[in-house]
Image (cartoon, rainbow, N blue to C red):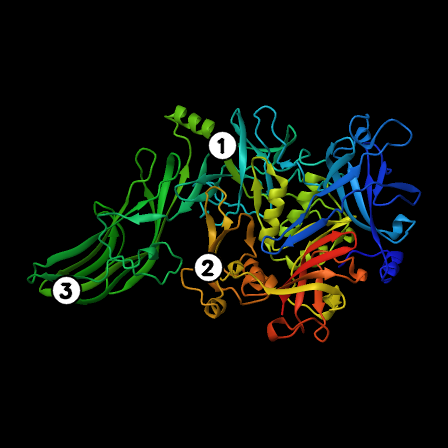
Amino acid sequence: MSLTLPGNYASASKISAITEDYLIQLYKSGSDDVSIGLAFNDKTVSSQFYHGAILNTPTIRESIDLAKSSAKQSSISLSIANFPISSSDFTLSSELFGSGNYYLNQSAKIFSCLSNASDIDDCLHLDDYRLIDVKHDANKVTLLLVQQRPWDFIDFPSNKSIGTNRYFPVAYGNFTREVSEPIDSGSGPQFCNSASVFPVPVSEVIGDNIKGLLHYGTGFSTASNQRDDTNPIEANLHFYEKNIDVFVPLYPVNETTVPYEQGQAINVSSSLERGFRWNDLEEHDTNEFNTPLFSNYIDTDFSHYSSSTGLMNVGASGEPGDPDEQQVNKRFMVNMKQPDGFVSKVKVHIRYKLQVTEANNYESVAARITDKVGNPYVEITAVTSSIGTLEISHTGSAGGIDPIELIGEVEVSSEQTGDADGQVAINELYVYATVKPNASEPDSHNKRINDLKLLYSGADGMLQSFSGSSAISASRVTEIHRDMLNRFAGYDRADTEILDWSGSNSARRNWKARYFALEPKPLKKTLDKLQYEGGFIFKLRPNGARYITVKDSYSASDADATLTKNDISKFKLNNSKFGDLLTKRVIRFRKHPARNSYLGNVTATNSATRDTWNIKAKEGIKEIKLEMLVDGASTITSGSVNASTGNPNDNFIRYYDQLFGDIKLEVSGEIVNKRYYGLETGDILLFDNDNMHLKPFGTNWSNRYFMITTIQRSPGVLNFEAQEVSY
């Protein structure tokens, strides 16, 4: 939506012979009133005198980058006559720097004024700036203005523990903890493969407790509507088993946070005791079981018995009264990945199948599973089959887990020539264990504690704190962005002051992010990253801001202007750059909280475009790593997808394919009809198909929608560039 033209400004813009002047308002520290007014010609507007001292023609340039989802506003350089201030001996240069008044880093506002407007309300407010540099000689003063951006010079996090000098983390999004306890405790050991956690810095060890720093408390913001969850649920801490790549909750479970310096902390026992299941294994060199699909040991499909001994045929040849007994056996042997610590107790769970499928002339027949020295765990003694589970206590050496060794055996006894076919199969195996300190090696455990830098939590991230929000965690990319602006930059506006907030936030309802920061980083860099991964643009505008997303489709009512050749001069048309095409992308997302890796890996291809533009197999492939986005990156978490399938706002892949998955049209020109001087970046343009300078490459303008990507203003001139976003 364009800047709103004041009523008299809009009326004046319809007059052909009209001049445009810029009004510059400079403010000094401690004053809300205009301290110095500048213009091209002397004038008084709303009782404020503006010195006609501007010597150059300033240019205001704003742009958005749809490929990066970023916005940019250029700085403005003003050359001003170094005139005397009032009747004093002070010149402008003396007043700005050296008079005891402070103008540097203070506000400056720019207005567009048409004809002889006498009221500031009849002028178009172009933007807000700050004065950052002053230079002068005897006759001229040069001022440098930059857009007044709330994120400038801000790093986060900034809240740290005083005693240990460690930062309280920042965490956003919905996280998930694990539930698992040691053997013989509570629900006992469980698999821990589903955690979504964030790192918790270890601050110190006090007595028997390790103190972890959380992202709650009053130290994160001074915003009046700041919400802080000082009693979060499921905040208990986890230990990262790096060799097995799982996050295991520490025991006993503590979910209660406590005030700690300028934030909140949570305690956990320094024993680091924990219990969990895992099935990460590899085949031992001496394993004799057939393993055409070794993964069948650890999948969840109980019909998979491929990993087994296969059929074992055994024969016996005896005489009446003197039966012959024969057996065939094979060794099952695997190594388990070792946990990080002393294993105090461990058990092995297996799911087996025993069967004797055929037997002839036998006195007795059996199929069994035994330990490595022949002591049976389970057996059958007839032509039958049996499916069941075993829980076997296991031993380890040096606090680890020894190889798991079992014997599969088929046996037949006969008083003549007899035989039998049997099978011993295993289709599920895991171990579950308790890991705790080795009482005989306290020094080793103390060193482990002292070297511990991070634990992990599944508590949800920061609550929404911006105006009009709910007391729930910020999880959409747009919610996190807006909360960061308020929480860390103090920039908060009502929904009504943020153009297109509702539509953009709704379009990103399924684009969820998880993000954490442990050390200070520039706020602007993080906001830009959120915009790129979230497929939206945030820009400041006079008296507010705007969120911009490209819609799934457009209709005539979405257009901010329908232009004809009478509204534009110097009109140019070109196709987008071939090098900007995105036809094959390897998307890595769902960043691992403890490793420099990603849990989601998808290859997205627009095959139609690659075929059309003769792109070879090895060409045009781009790897993209998403640090924040977890839901909304793709329809799947691994494999290959068609980048052109679905609606543009379904996910990250489809959104950028809509913009750069094929060659688009780009247009530029100068707006000569001043009624459109309110146009800004992000606005949607249509062109009158029956009243334009030319046809686009021999086609037509009907239903081609363009988004303005660049606006360049100077007095009496408005240039634009726009990119096709829907056709």
Q: Which residue occupies the extreme front position in the image?
A: 139
Give amino acid for label 2: Gly
Q: Nearer the viewer, residue 698 or 194?
A: 698
Q: For the residues marked 1 and 2, what is the alpha-carbon distance in whole angstroms?
A: 41 Å
Q: Is the residue marked by circle 2 packed among few (<14), some (14-19), or many (20+) residues within 10 Å?
A: some
Which structural element holds mark 3? strand
Q: Nearer the viewer, mark 1 or mark 3?
A: 1
Q: Is the residue marked by circle 3 packed among few (<14), some (14-19), or many (20+) residues within 10 Å?
A: many
Total label count?
Answer: 3
Left or right side of 643 for 20: right
Q: Residue at x 63, y 65 (%)?
A: 573
Expressed as whole percent of the image width and height from the top left, the position of residue 213 reads 58, 33
Residue designated by label 3: 419
Q: Is there a contact, CB below 8 Å, between mark 1 and mark 3? A: no
Q: Residue at x 76, y 68 (%)?
A: 566
Give amino acid for label 3: Asp
Left or right side of 101 for 726: left
Sequence-wise first label, 1 or 2: 1
Q: Nearer the viewer, mark 3 or mark 2?
A: 2
Q: Nearer the viewer, residue 407 or 444?
A: 444
Expressed as whole percent of the image width and height from the top left, the position of residue 519 reads 56, 35
Left or right side of 401 for 554: right
Residue designated by label 1: 453
Q: Is residue 167 above or below residue 701?
A: above
